[in-house]
Image (cartoon, rainbow, N blue to C red):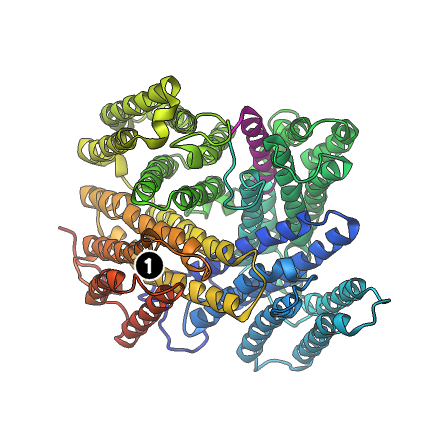
Amino acid sequence: MSDDGLRPHPSAGGVRLVGRDPGAEGDVSWMELFVDLFFVFAFLKVATLMSADLSVFGTIRGVLVILLLWHCWTSCAWLGNVIHVDRGGMPLLMTGVATAVLVIGVAVPEAFADVPGNLSGPVVVVGGYLLIRFCVLAVLTYHQRGGATGRRLLVWLAFLAAGAMLLVAVLLPPALPERVDGDLVRVVLFAGALGVDFVIFAGVGRGTWQVVSPWHLAERHAVIILVALGETIISIGASRGVGVDEPVTWEVAAAATLGMIIVSALWWTYFDLAKMLAEHGLWRARGPARTRLARDAYLGLHLPMISGLIIFALGLKHAVAVAVGEADRPWDTTSVLTLFGGVLLYLIALVAFEWRTARIIGRSPLIGIGLLLALLPLAVGAPAVGALALLAVGVAAMAVADQTIFRRRHQALHHLVEPEAARLGGVSPRELFVDLVFVFAFIQVTLLMTRHPSLLGIVRGLTLLALLWWAWISYSWLANIVRTETAVVRFSTIGIATAVLVLGFAIPQAFGPAGGGLQGSSLIVVCYVAGQLIQGVLLWQVSRTNAVLRHVARRVALPSGIALALLAVIVAVEVVTPAVVSDSLGITLLWVAALLVQYVGAYLRESAAWRVQSVRHWVDRYALIMLIAFGEAIISVGLATSGRPVSVTVLALVVVGALSIGTLWWSYFTTIDSSRLALRARTGRARTLLARDAFTYLHLPMVAGVMLVAFSLRQILVPERTVNAYGHYALYLGVALYLAANQWYWWRMWRVVSWQRVGGAVLVAALSPLTVLLPPPWPLVLLTGVGVVAAALEVLHGGDPRTHEPRPAT
C-alpha cells in the first residue's frame, strides 16, 4: 500500500507532475485509497436508488448510474497508473475529485427524478461526472503532451460529444410536452452519452494510453472488488438503510450468517486464484497486447462483476429486511431473481475474466453457476432465509470443489502464481476482507452514540470501540505471524469475520435490547469470545513449533482470562435482570473495567506479543484501520446530507465536510513512509516496544478522535436540527484528541515535537466552549478553516520535521 520505494515526503517536487517509472513496481497510494472511500458511499446510494424501483426500467436507471460511476473510477485508476497522484500538486486535485464523488453520491437518488424548487439533481450528477472526467483527461493530456495528438484529439471529441448529450439529457425532458415520456427520453440520452464515452474506453490499447505499472492496475481493481464486497457486507446490516437501528433476532442472525457465507465465497473465488493468475498474465504480456489485456480484463470485465455484486447487495438487503420484519414489500420472484441474478452475473464475468487473462476455464465457478441455476426454481418458492440458504449452498460448493475434486489442478495453479504471491509483503486479501466487516462495526458504534447523544452514550460508544480495537489488533498481530494462505487459515478468517459482523449488529442494543430482539451485551460477548477462540486455535497451531509464541500465549492468558470473567458477569446480569442493563452506570463501569484489565495487563505482562515480523505489513495494517475510521466519517457526511433535496446549502455542507476530513487525513497519511523508516531503524526489543506503544496503543485515541468527529457530523451538518452541546464538543474535542494523539505518536517515533500540531490541538480545545452557541454548521466551517490554514502553514514551512531521517533508538 505504499509507493515505489521510500521517500522523504510525498509532496516533494512542488506542483509538477511525477510520472510512474515503467521499470518499477508501483503500489496503490494512500491518496487513491482515500478517494475510494468516497466511492464506497456513492455505490451505497446506487443500491438505495435501485431498491426504490425494482422494475426493469428502475434497474436500467440504476445500471446507468453504476456505469457513470465506473467511468469516473476507471479514469482515476488509469490516472494513478500513469502519474503519482500523491506527489506534487496532485493531492489537491484528487481531493477535489473525491469531493465531486461525494456530491454525486448525495445526488444519486435524484439522478433521474428531480425534486422541484431546488437544484436539479440530474444536473448535479452530470456536472460532477463531467468535472471528474475533464480533470483526468486534462492531466493525462498535459502529461503526455509530447506524443501523437491524433488519438488524444479523438478522445477529447468523444468526451465533448458525450458531455453535450448528457447535458441535453438533463435539460431537455422538463421542456418536453406532457404527452412525451420525459423519463424515457432522459434514460435513452443517458445511455447514448455513456455509449459515446465508450470510445475513450475502446481507445485504450490502440495507442491512446499505455499500462505503465501492471501490478498497480491489477491491485487497483482488486481494491474496487473489495469495495463492492464491502457494500454487500454493509447491506447485511443495513436492511432499512445505513445507520438505521435494527433489532437482532434469531432470524436476523441466521440471515447475517448466511449472507456472510455467500460474501466470503465470492471473495474466495476472486482472491484465491483469479487475481494472481490475471496479474501473472498481465506481467507476461508486452506492449499493445498488455494494454488490450488490461482494457478487456480490468476496465471491461470488472464492470459486470461490480454490477453483479451491487445487484446482489440489493437482494441481500431486502432478504435481511424481510427477516427483520421491516420490509416495505413482500419477498417475491423479483426479489429472488435479484438475489441470484447478481451472483450469477458476477460468476459469469469471473469466468470470462479468467479466460481472458489466463486462458483457463474456471471449473468451480462453472459448478457454482450450474448449481445456482438448478436451485433457482426451489428458491422462488422459499422464504427469504430459505433462499439465502440455497444460495449459500450453491456458492460454498465452489470452495469445497477447489479443496476436493479439483485439488490437484488447484495446487498446480497456485504453484504457477507463487512468484506473484511471494512479492506481496504487505497486507493480505484475507486481512482486507476482515477489515470490511470492521467498517460496518464502526458505523454501528457511531449509530449507538447517535441514539444516545449524551456523555454516558459517548462513553459507552468509545468503550465498545475499544472492544472492537482489541479484537482488531489481536487478529492483526496473529496475521503478522501467520502469513500462509491455507484453507484452514481462510476458513478461520471467515469465522472471525462472521463473529465481528454479528457483534456489529448487536452494538446499538449493547445497553438494552431493541424491539424484542436478543440481549445485546450477551450477543456481543459471545461473538467476541468466539472470535478470540478461533484466533486461539490458529495461535496454538503456529506455536506448536515456536517456544516464544507459547510463552507469549501463556503470559497474556491471565489478563485475557480476567477480562473475559468480567464480561461474563455482564452477561449473567443481563440474563437475570435485563432491565438493569439499559440504565445502569455499574454495567458501563464493568465494561470499562474489563477493557482496562485487558489493555493494562497485556501492556505489562509481555512486550514480545508485539514483535514485528514485517515492518511494511505492520505499518500498513494500522494505516488501513485509520483509513476505515476516516471512511466512517465520510459516510457520516453523506448520511447527514442524504434524504434532503439537493440545494446549494447541501452541496456547501458536503464540500465543508469533505475538506474537514481531508485536513485530518493529510496530517496522518503524508508521513506513512517516514513511519516505516522509523520502525525499520529500530531493532530487537526497541522495535518491539515502539510497535506496541506507537501503533497498538497510541493509534486507539487517534481512531477515537475520528469516530467522535464522525458522530458529531451526523448532527452538525443538519442546519434545521438543534445540536446539543455533546455533539458540538464531540466535534472540537475529537479533533483535539486526534491531534494530541498524533503528536504523541510522532514524539514516540521521532522524539520530535511539532509545535504546529500541539498549538492546533490547544487552539481547537480552547475554541470548543467559545463556539458552542454558534448555529450549525458554522462551528464546522470555522474548524475546517483552522485545519486548512494549519495544513497550509506546515507546507509553507517546508514540510513536517518528522519526515526526516529518524534518530537512533534509545
Considering depth in this image, is 362 or 536 the residue closer to the camera?
A: 536
Q: Badge 1: few (under 14), some or many (20 or more) residues near its Cα, within 10 Å?
A: some
Residue 169 in magenta stretch: no
Considering depth in this image, is 661 or 397 the residue closer to the camera?
A: 661
Quarter of the figure that contains the N terminus:
bottom left
**Count of marks overlaid on the render:** 1
Q: Tell me the residue at 54%/49% (across/down).
A: 227
Residue 804: % across, % down: 24, 65
Q: Which residues are magenta?
A: 248-271
- The quarter holding residue 736 reads bottom left
Q: Tell me the residue at 27%/55% (across/down).
A: 733
Res 416 seen here: no
> Mark 1 is on which residue type?
Tyr
Q: Tell me the residue at 67%/47% (across/down).
A: 51
Secondary structure mainly formed by the magenta segment = helix
Vertical arrangement, residue 123 with respect to residue 753, above or below: below
Residue indicated by mark 1:
668
Res 727 seen here: yes
Which residue lies most toward the right here?
179
Which residue lies most toward the left here?
810
Vertical arrangement, residue 809 with respect to residue 559, above or below: below
Residue 479: % across, % down: 39, 37
Residue 350: % across, % down: 67, 45
Q: Tell me the residue at 36%/54% (across/down).
A: 709
Q: Secondary structure at mark 1?
A: helix
Residue 196: % across, % down: 74, 69
Residue 257 in magenta stretch: yes
